[in-house]
Image (cartoon, rainbow, N blue to C red):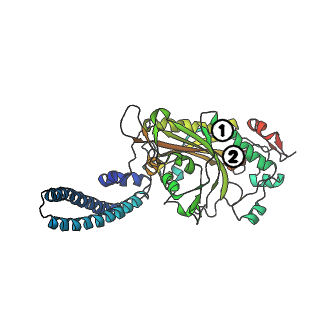
Amino acid sequence: MIYYIKTMLDSRFVRENPEKIAQALRRRNTEIDLAPFREIEERRLSTLRRLDDLREKRNKVSEEISRLKKQKQDAQGLIEEMKGVSDEIKELEESQRSLDREARDFLLTLPNIPNESVPEGKDETGNVEVRKWGEPRQFDFEPLNHWDLGEMHGIMDFERAAKIAGARFSLMKGMGARLERALMNYMLDMNTSKGYMEVLPPILVNPESMTGTGQLPKFEAELFKIADPGFYLIPTAEVPVTNIHRGEILEEEKLPVCYTAYTPCFRREAGSYGKDTRGLIRQHQFNKVELVRFTRPEDSYAELEKLTSNAEDILRGLELPYRVMALCTGDLGFSSAKTYDLEVWLPGQGKYREISSCSNFEDFQARRADIRFRRTGKKGTEFVHTLNGSGLAIGRTLVAILENYQQKDGSIIIPTALMPYMGAGKIGE
């Protein structure tokens, strides 16, 4: 059973339910002192109350001044008094704007509340296997890592990539470049066949877009930024695609809205020093196809299962063994309420590695990006729920194909589903 908790990380909910927020964040192994926020809120609400009183007084006295003037009576004393009131109102309005910014800045640091169905755990060791598909292949020889296979066939050149850009970049050549392109087209075709609209978004975005999906301010150190005029290179197509509808009101009958997009992605990997320094697993630049869905709140967990299944279909079509892991509270991403990781089997490493994360953010991103919907025949609006998942990470899928389809002579068989896109059935003799 999926339990739905409305995530309302707005000022009123946090102010009125501090213990609920603290308890939810403790499930994430996160301790945040809410006292500074409560102090900001007390000052902000006090300022608002004073402003309301002064505005009401100004309105009443303005009516009295108008009455006195009509009766040819002296209103100068009241006019002088209102000048002082107007000056105080201006000061309080500036103070209110400052306090509003402080409150918003604090709220932007709070991660999402985990859904009640998320397993408890401190870190990735607490993740729970949901299901497996396919059996890892048994080799009658020692399987090679993808970087050895890539160098053997001349389809990857890490040395020249380092000369061009630095560490954690790759240069794909010949059949390697063609395989990346084939995977991109195969994934997009699979996704559009399931009703996703293909889009090709900008890969440079403004700070508002990064804030809307939760990358800012939390992950500033992991982003590549262009100083002038202040763009960011996207870490995932989730950012521009989710922001397609930032500040908009969608109609209920059009939900769910589903998009798929190919983009290059850019990440500093600032928190991953020393991990996966060889090969394609952890790069500063990589290619990915993304799935994004906008749904009604009551549908979002069923939609999460659909989205996850859509990503799995790509792995099954390529006949790559994988498993689905439900992330525990301690391994959950900042913006996510619930996440499934798809992990593909890599025989060169002898273990499963993440190839897609499929997440339900509930209304966390929609609240930050102000994405709402209007129910048919009803007044008012509600926040949509947003979901996204990789469908799939192209470089890691290429790694899985090289390692799972390698032959004893070093050649690599192309999966049947990719042959029409490759125009070849094998890499190497």
Query: Alpha-carbon distance for marks 2 and 1?
Result: 10 Å
| Image quadrant in which you'd find residue 171 | bottom right
Q: Is residue 53 left or right of residue 225?
A: left
Along the line of sight, the residue nearer the viewer: 110 or 251 = 251
Please indicate, yes or no, whether residue 334 appears anywhere in the rendered image. Answer: no
Amino acid identity at mark 1? Ile
Q: Residue 373: x and y, percent? A: 43, 39
Q: Which residue is mark 1?
A: 314
Residue under numbered circle 2: 397
Element assignment for label 1: helix
Q: Position of residue 23 (x, y in %)?
A: 36, 52
Front-lying residue, 198 or 111? 198
Q: Are marks 2 and 1 in contact (CB under 8 Å)?
A: yes
Residue 410: image tag: none
Q: Residues within 10 Å of mark 2 (few under 14, many from 20)?
A: many
* Residue 211 in view in this figure: yes
In the image, farthest residue toward the front: 72
Residue ID at (78%, 58%): 157
The total of numbered circles placed on residues is 2
Point out residue 54 in the picture as x, y percentages from the top left corner: 22, 60
Q: Secondary structure at mark 2?
A: helix
- In this view, the residue in front, 287 or 397, is 287
